[in-house]
Image: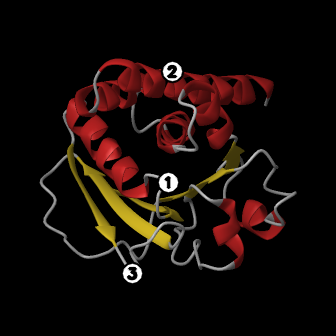
Amino acid sequence: MFQVRLHGRGGQGVVTSAEMLSLASFTEGHYAQAFPSFGSERTGAPVVAFARINDQEIRLREPIMEPDAVLIQDRTLLESVPVFAGLKSDGYVLINSAQSPQDLGLEELVERLPAGHVVTLPATKYALERIGRPLPGAAMLAGFAALTGKLKLESIQQAFRTRYKGQVAEANALVAEDAYNFFTHIKSSL
């Protein structure tokens, strides 16, 4: 079972991102589940959502304490929330930021995890360019797919096309493609 914990702030679409991750997993024939954990339900408050992907039925229902991957949609949470708590020793970290992990002060984490497992992605930039709003979910999920190899870009895009229609669906599909291509260029330069 592959477990993902998503961190962000209210209004950034963290819960929707977990749902889209689950839907993309279903598209590829996996079992999946997604659920939120709410504290203060207001815009800007820290929000956590969870997703699990497996090739067998998932019976667990509790929050993910030892994630295989952590997606952080708001880098300001690095200073205020224990976003890396319980992260597995071979885990993945994807942070929405134009700064490098080293510029964010994460040298120790980069050293602790396997090479290439701690990366940043300017997800909000892609969302603003294509959607006109700071909703980084599609970019973060495409980044997750490219980083881990757990899902295909097309599955992420299909999840957004299933949930949304028309321009909104296509804008999110383009955001996902932009983010996926960002990772393709990073991997080819390594």
> Residue at 52% of width from left, 68% of height from top?
88
- The C terminus, quarter of image: top right
Q: Secondary structure at mark 3?
A: loop
Q: Within 10 Å of the Cα at label 2, are there few (<14), some (14-19), or many (20+) other Cα atoms? A: many
Proximity of marks 3 and 2: CB atoms separated by less than 8 Å:
no
> Residue at 56% of width from left, 60% of height from top?
90
Amino acid beneath label 3 = Gly
State left or right for residue 55 relative to residue 85: left
Proximity of marks 1 and 3: CB atoms separated by less than 8 Å:
no
User: Disc 1 or 3, which lies upstream in sequence?
Assistant: 1
In the rendered view, would you say 129 is above or below 36?
above
Q: Which residue is mark 2?
A: 174
Q: CA distance from mark 1 to mark 2?
A: 18 Å
Q: Which residue is mark 1?
A: 12
Q: CA distance from mark 3 to mark 2?
A: 32 Å
Q: Is residue 57 visible?
A: yes
